[in-house]
Image (cartoon, rainbow, N blue to C red):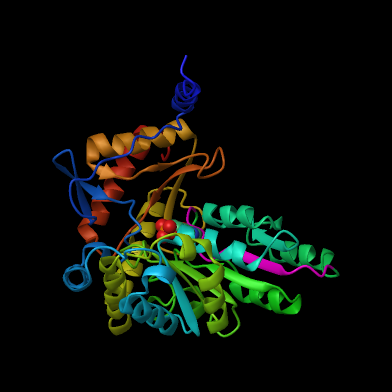
Amino acid sequence: MGSLDWIKGEIESMKSAGRFVPIKVLEGPQGAWVRISGKDFLNMCSNNYLGLANHPEVKKAAIEAIEEYGVGAGAVRSIAGTNEIDIKLEEKVAKFKHMEASLVYQGGLLANSGTIPAIVGKDDLVFSEELNHASIIDGVRLSSARRIVYKHMNMADLEKNLRENASSSSRKLIITDGVFSMDGDIAPVPELVDLAIKYGAISYVDDAHGEGVLGDHGRGIADYFKVSDKIDIEMGTFSKAIGSMGGFVAGPEYLVEYLKRKSRPFLFSSGLNPGDTAAVLKSIEILERDDSLLKKLWSNSDYLKKNLSDVGFDLGHSKTPITPVMVGDERKTIDLSEKLYASHRIFASPIVYPTVPVGTARIRLMPSALHSRKDLDYAVEAFTSAGRELGIIK
Ligand SMILES: *Cc1c(COP(=O)(O)O)cnc(C)c1O
């Protein structure tokens, strides 16, 4: 018996519960269609909302930056020096988000797990929304602060918890996803920010699925709600609509200066590669000058949602392009995904426990600006036929 043998048993039990989903290998770039095992599949599960992951101008910017600056950052920024394009990107992000300053991280997960422990510690309180992303949960755990979970979208519950702790002299942080990635609903940020002000708490919104999707030219959730001047910290990622890699937090200049001295992913992990930094800069430039991709994303998602709900699918209560096709049963969800894949060449991954609660399994469709109407019609026809065969719709 090897000491890792228990893992085999864990895998067997995941398999029998329908929670061991194979990972597909792609043989080309992200796009409306992707190549798998030499065949093309309609891609309905990427966060590449605007198609910037394989945009010719963005690729060109990355290639040019590699020619000029090479492929690696060399070491952590505080030791090997910060590349001038890192500074350019931080200024660009701050301006784009209508915030004073920003700090770029190597990813969204690191932005959360690095920033949260820098601003709260073991004597502090974190009011955390029930469905927050794993990277927020990790950040809170790393901080050792006391976590008080409030109910999903429920500002009355948040206020009740704030009131109960009003006399505490601890530092308080209210933290939430802006757009909830598995359901596509949007946090009531204006009410949340007002509660933060009323109770003297820090407001912190993770805008990973709002970047490039919500607000004027995709500036994100704070712009969408017009609260950029009231929110304390806006966090985001460059790996979704922005099409590349990296993450950031935006807020006051002194926060950024403080994080540069306190945040562990900044101090103990090398900076983004120049190619990624340049790609992100170019993607934001494209968003600033042109919102046609954004408009196409929304019209595609309205079209897909209308046609799927017309044939009887339950799409939950999404307010964004995220389109969850609710199935419930995990085995059935995996069967639907496999049928779509094998019989219709549609790549649409099942989302099961522990990513979503047991009994709420779904296929989350991600329409993008790259899909044509013909692609979306093709998806709806395939879902209709497979959904009827499996008894998910009539
Ligand atoms: C995807 C996501 C992240 C992580 O971003 P990466 O850049 O992929 O590490 C963080 N928060 C939320 C809400 C996300 O959806």
Report the span colored magenta. 168-182
- Percent coordinates x, y for residue 337 in the rendering: 35, 38
Reply above or below: 363 against 243: above
Reply above or below: 111 against 375: below
Q: Residue at x 66, y 67 (%)?
A: 174
- Percent coordinates x, y for residue 64 in the rendering: 17, 72
Q: From the viewer's perspective, tell me whether residue 327 is left or right of residue 280.
A: right
Can the viewer see residue 185 in this picture?
Answer: no
Residue 176 falls inside the magenta stretch:
yes
Q: Residue at x 24, y 34 (%)?
A: 342
Q: From the viewer's perspective, tell me whether residue 251 is left or right of residue 119.
A: left
Residue extending farthest to the front is: 79
Quarter occupied by residue 39: top left
Reply above or below: 334 against 97: above
- Percent coordinates x, y for residue 33 in the rendering: 21, 52
Q: From the viewer's perspective, tell me whether residue 242 is left or right of residue 40.
A: right
Can the viewer see residue 149 in this picture?
Answer: yes
Reply above or below: 324 against 245: above
Q: Nearer the viewer, residue 377 or 394?
A: 377
Count of numbered circles on the image: 0
Residue extending farthest to the top is: 1
